[in-house]
């Protein structure tokens, strides 16, 4: 139950709201008990034909309790819902705040669908944490104590009889129900997560499923999980219904026991017959506080399992060390000393004893075969991961001593597969610079050759580009990502495969524009394409995490090393691709 106690700590700022709502809930049920008891008193007393004056107090009591029950119920619902929504907002803010520092290193082995299920479904499961988990037992115990003290003033034995049945309904029965359905509830949450994950994968991977004719198999798997989930949910509802039935049986048992004990007292003149009816209806009304307990046990199990899954993420240790330094160096030179890094769960380092100096305003290209460590360099510069050994300096400051949230003010990065948000072109550009004006947005689209997209659409910058920019081509998505980076106007640009989806002419124009940004900016270009690298001040060749060559384009060609061989191989492929199709001839 440690997860529940941790949730209590998170909910601590709202303890006064929760206490107020619980007290209002108790007063509401107390008003209901008072209404039935005074009604019983009036009816039983009226049967003896007393004067109207003897009934006057009871009549006023019925009016008071009838009105107050409605008023307090409204206030209790109002405060309860306010507390619930405040708690839900707190849980969401807490989880997102814990999740953000983990990305991407701490989340690299997590599935998107599973994270989505935790962020939405599991937090949504905590919606009833107060209303269904905290309040019902608290209110029921207050009612139990109130009824014991009330009935005890008239007859201790009757109070003890009610106490026994209410303890059974409030403690023993919920514990038995919890044990009976604990594994069932855990299985429901896990299956729901599997189903969410499968649905997300199915939707995002629908083109591939259609291409390989696997939609039917995916549908069968979804239906299988859904049927299993439905079966478990039906079993859960049967357990709750059984619990509710036993609460009703205990209420009837309490009423019957009170009657069996009290009727002889009435016959002996030791108890007023009017009070017998009052006690009987009071006992029945008091069990209203125990009716929510079956749902409370279901909510407790659900909250416990959901909390486990959330804490599993938030307790993940990040590779990134916390940094107190908020100020960014005004010097933007980059110096990397003896840097080594190995990804978790891999057998070999991605970078080994890596050293590189990049003075501000220079144009540096980093090339090499796939898996040589080029993208890892970006991850370490942006502090998505921190290096195992060695150090990166930004100016005179160590990079790991600078707050990671400040790095986007220095580094403008385009990753190999940039994410395009669902929305319009304008929406995606304003992410980089929310205060940008119309002319500034249009100018940057012209600079990256995206203006032809605006000309084709009557909506211009407000053209809808779909989920992840699906209505744009691969090259247009790349240009949009570049426009965002240029709009951000950072002193250092790090571009990973910027021309991968561009045609030859477009690639030449964009590369010429980027090279011309120096010496006002540092350009770090990571690429497989070597034909546009002549203007680079330095070309760094990586292989298996190490620098094997470094120099200008002319120096590396003259040396006829690995870079020379890669460039020669690419040129030969271009020649072959340019030859006419023999079959067509």
Image (cartoon, rainbow, N blue to C red):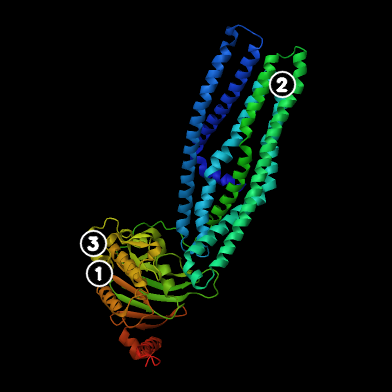
Q: Which residue is mark 1?
A: 447
Residues tagged 2 and 1 counted as in contact (Cβ below 8 A) = no
Q: Secondary structure at mark 1?
A: helix
- State the separation of the CA atoms marked 3 and 1: 11 Å
- State the separation of the CA atoms marked 2 and 3: 83 Å
Tell us which disc is closer to us: 2 or 1: 1
Left or right of 276 in this view: 304: left
Left or right of 201 in this view: 454: left
Please say if 171 is above or below 541: above
Indicate which disc residue 135 carries.
Answer: none
Question: Residue 296: percent from the left, percent from the top?
Answer: 61, 41
Q: Secondary structure at mark 3?
A: helix
Q: Residues within 10 Å of mark 2 (few under 14, many from 20)?
A: few
Asked which quadrant contains residue 478, the reply is: bottom left
Please say if 486 is above or below 538: above
In this orientation, which residue lies closer to the viewer: 495 or 48? 48
Q: Earlier in the sequence, mark 3 or mark 1?
A: 3
Residue 394 appears in the rendering: no
Question: Residue 304: percent from the left, percent from the top?
Answer: 59, 48
Q: Secondary structure at mark 2?
A: helix
Tell us which disc is closer to us: 2 or 3: 3
Q: Which residue is mark 3?
A: 440
Q: Earlier in the sequence, mark 2 or mark 1?
A: 2
Quarter in which the C terminus is drawn: bottom left
Q: Which residue is mark 2?
A: 156
Residue at position x 65%, y 23% in the image: 281
Q: Residue furthest left?
A: 439
Q: Earlier in the sequence, mark 2 or mark 3?
A: 2
Question: Residue 417: percent from the left, percent from the top?
Answer: 40, 69
């Amino acid at each position: 139950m440690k997860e529940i106690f941790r949730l209590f700590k998170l909910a601590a700022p709202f303890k006064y709201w929760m206490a107020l709502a619980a007290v209002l809930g108790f007063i509401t049920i107390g008003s209901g008990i008072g209404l039935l008891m005074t009604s019983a008193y009036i009816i039983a007393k009226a049967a003896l034909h007393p004067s109207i004056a003897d009934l006057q107090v009871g009549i006023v009591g019925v009016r008071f309790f009838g009105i107050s029950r409605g008023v307090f119920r409204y206030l209790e619902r109002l405060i309860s819902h306010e507390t619930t929504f405040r708690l839900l907002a707190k849980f969401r803010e807490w989880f997102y705040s814990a999740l953000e520092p983990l990305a991407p290193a701490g989340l690299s082995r997590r599935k998107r669908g599973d994270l989505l299920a935790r962020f939405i479904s599991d937090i949504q499961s905590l919606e009833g944490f107060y209303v269904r988990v905290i309040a019902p037992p608290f209110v029921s115990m207050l009612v139990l104590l109130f009824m014991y003290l009330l009935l005890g003033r008239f007859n201790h034995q009757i109070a003890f009889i009610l106490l026994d049945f209410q303890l059974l309904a409030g403690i023993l029965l919920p514990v038995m129900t919890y044990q009976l359905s604990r594994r069932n509830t855990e299985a429901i949450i896990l299956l729901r997560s599997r189903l969410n994950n499968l649905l997300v994968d199915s939707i995002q991977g629908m083109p591939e499923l259609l291409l390989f004719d696997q939609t039917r198999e995916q549908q069968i798997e979804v239906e299988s999980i859904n049927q299993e989930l439905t079966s478990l949910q039906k079993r859960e509802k049967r357990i709750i219904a059984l619990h509710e039935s036993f609460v009703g049986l205990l209420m009837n048992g309490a009423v019957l026991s009170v009657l069996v004990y009290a009727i002889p007292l009435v016959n002996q003149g030791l108890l007023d017959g009017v009070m017998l009816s009052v006690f009987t209806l009071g006992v029945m009304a008091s069990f209203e506080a125990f009716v929510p307990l079956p749902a409370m046990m279901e909510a407790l199990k659900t909250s416990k399992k959901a909390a486990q899954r959330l804490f599993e993420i938030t307790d993940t240790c990040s590779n990134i060390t916390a940094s107190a330094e908020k100020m960014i160096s005004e010097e933007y030179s980059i110096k990397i000393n003896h840097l080594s890094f190995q990804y978790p769960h891999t057998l070999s380092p991605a970078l080994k004893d890596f050293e590189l100096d990049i003075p501000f305003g220079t144009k540096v290209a980093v090339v090499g075969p796939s898996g040589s460590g080029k993208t890892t360099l970006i991850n370490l510069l942006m502090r998505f991961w921190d290096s195992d050994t060695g150090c990166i300096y930004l100016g005179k400051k160590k990079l790991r001593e600078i707050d990671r949230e400040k790095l986007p003010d220095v580094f403008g990065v385009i990753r190999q597969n940039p994410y395009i948000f669902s929305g319009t072109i304008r929406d995606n550009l304003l992410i980089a610079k929310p205060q940008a004006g119309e002319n500034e947005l249009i100018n940057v689209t012209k600079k990256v050759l995206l203006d032809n997209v605006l000309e084709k659409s009557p909506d211009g910058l407000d053209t809808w580009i779909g989920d992840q920019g699906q209505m744009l081509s691969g090259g247009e998505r790349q240009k949009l990502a570049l426009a965002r980076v240029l709009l951000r106007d950072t002193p250092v640009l790090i571009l990973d495969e910027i021309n991968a989806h561009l045609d030859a002419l477009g690639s030449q124009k964009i590369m010429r524009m980027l090279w011309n940004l120096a010496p006002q900016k540092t350009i770090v270009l990571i690429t497989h394409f070597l034909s546009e690298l002549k203007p680079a001040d330095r070309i760094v060749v990586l292989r298996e995490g190490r620098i094997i060559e470094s120099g200008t384009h002319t120096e590396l060609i003259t040396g006829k090393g690995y870079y020379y061989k890669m460039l020669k191989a690419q040129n030969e492929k271009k020649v072959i691709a340019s030859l006419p199709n023999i079959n067509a001839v």
